[in-house]
Amino acid sequence: MKGIECAVEKPSQKVSGPDGFTEHLGKKQSWFYKPFQKIHKNTLPNPSAWPHARHTHLQRRELQADVPHWPRCTRAKQNSRAARGTEAAPGRPPRPATPPFRGPPRRPGLRAVPPRRRAGGLGLVAAASAPLLGGAAPPPEAPGRAERAHGRAGTRVGKDGAGGLASVGSPMPEAGPEAAAAAAELLPFLALGARPDLQAAAAQHALELSGSGPGRALLAGQAALLRALGALAAAPAPAPARDAARALVNLAADPGLHEPLLAAEPGLPARLLGCALDPQWPWAEEAAAVLANLSREPGPAAALMAALAAAGPGESGLERLVRALCTPGYNARAPLHCLGPVLSNLSQRPAARAFLLDPGRCVVQRLLPLTRYPDSSVRRGGVVGTLRNCCFEHRHHEWLLGPEVDILPFLLLPLAGPEDFSEEEMERLPVDLQYLPSDKQREPDADIRKMLIEAIMLLTATAPGRKQVRDQGAYLILRELHSWEPEPDVRVACEKLIQVLIGDEPERGLENLLEVQVPEGVERQLQQQDRQEQERCEWERRERELGPEPQAEAAAPT
């Protein structure tokens, strides 16, 4: 799954997130969890393109509209036609042609970026990066998948965009010494004591620059600019903290920029963590999105874990994070969906898994209801990724499958549909999976469905785990899911789990599948098979996407 990036405001437009959900940030634009596309624009504006110049032009047009109408006569019509053209009316001096007023420039749009997929096999995974926020849409010919409703992180949460006030789709020039010097000129306006209107304009230009690869590289080479953005992202109003945080979201979506970002501001994870967990901070979601992007890589994740450990006396940092994620309305001004990907990324570290699986803390039990959270696929995906990573600890499988946690029904319910089973089959299912309503819907996000299947696969690593998964009727749910599943890679994962459930038990000494030592040659063969399966799934996906067109043409009357 991929990285999180930010969007600038745009006329009211409904956007489906990669989370599978639709969100509206600010007044007009939805920006979240879809992986995003980058922008192509000029780096810096020219003075004539500033908002005050356009406002003056708009006022001039409005004043011209207030002039009384000409009387209806041939002379007036001639003068009116001449005023619109380049020829002069009889007896009047020539008037230059004025270009038609097209209104203020359109704000950049938002596109989704596909989540990063693994070639095959099971392993600890990070949530998709948050989408890139801000910048203009790429040219029409630029390849890319349609927007998804999750961002997983990421989710991933990214897309490319470019800064400047040039026309949408104009290519951004390569970063050179002149561009670097021009970018450095933004620094005085990003300082905390700068004039608010200039500070807001400078933060907006930094956000637009962060929407493209060359723009991000330009900003990453300016350590002072990165420090100024980090300080501005945590500054109180009237500082433009939102735009500064969104620029950091875009920068953090590029793994290659994590090192210069943390080198310029080593305390950035701790500062943003304080903002994300502050119940009164209005831009806590943007701060969490930056942390979700940063924590995908081992180095920044370790720095974030250190910040959580040093949170202070009393409640631990991880406990505060879990409480903020599981408490509805923790922050009345920010939804905090991105804390799900943050926790999923941190669960790749053994210390975080030890905290989550501590029976005395009841953390897993608090996370389980969020596997069906209806408002955000980003939060659902982050929680499911966290549970999946916890299932790697096979020593805790008995506790996870036992009555104290009973994790299996929570993993199977999102995969179940409205199918009817016979009375004998219905009795094999857990109570929560029996007699589901006829309008029961499966999890709409394919990546989350795949993570749910992989979590159950990990629970079948031991012989007692396989027996308990079989006894609770998991095969019946998976059988119906396989016949319904439209995504090839999810269907392949479902087939592998079904083979484990209906196949013979391994030989003595090989009961724990997570501890089996695979010879190097066999491992290479398995990896090659995984790559071939992935290529076949991609081919099937493309065929399915292109399939409806010929059918529609065939159905057309002749």
Image (cartoon, grey):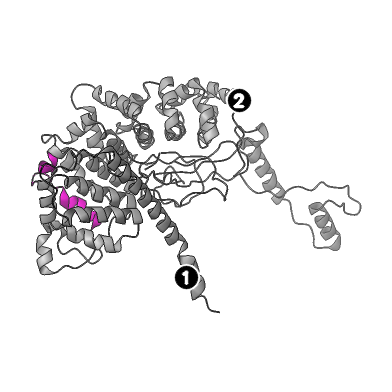
Picture coordinates of residue 446, whole percent (x, y): 33, 53
* Separation of marks 1 and 2 at Cα, in angstroms: 54 Å
Query: Which stretch did the figure color magenta?
Result: 396-416
Q: Amino acid at mark 2?
A: Ala
- Residue name at image x 23 percent, y 36 percent: 322
Q: Where on the picture, by quarter, is residue 413?
A: bottom left
Q: Which residue is mark 2?
A: 182
**Extreme-bottom residue of the structure:** 558
Horizontal arrangement in the rendering, residue 16 relative to residue 394 (left or right): right
Quarter of the N terminus within the rendering: top left
Q: How many marks?
A: 2
- Residue name at image x 79 percent, y 48 percent: 97
Q: Which residue is mark 1?
A: 551
Structural crowding at the residue carrying mark 2, measured as other residues with C-alpha within 10 Å and reported as few (<14), some (14–19) or many (≥20): few
Front residue of this view, candidates 78 and 105: 105
Horizontal arrangement in the rendering, residue 34 relative to residue 335 (left or right): right
| Vertical arrangement, residue 72 with respect to residue 67, above or below | below
Horizontal arrangement in the rendering, residue 419 relative to residue 230 (left or right): left
For residue 269: magenta?
Answer: no
Q: Report helix, strand or loop for mark 1.
A: helix
Q: Report helix, strand or loop for mark 2.
A: helix
Q: Nearer the viewer, mark 1 or mark 2?
A: 1
Q: Amino acid at mark 1?
A: Gln
Is the magenta region chiefly helix, strand or loop? Answer: helix
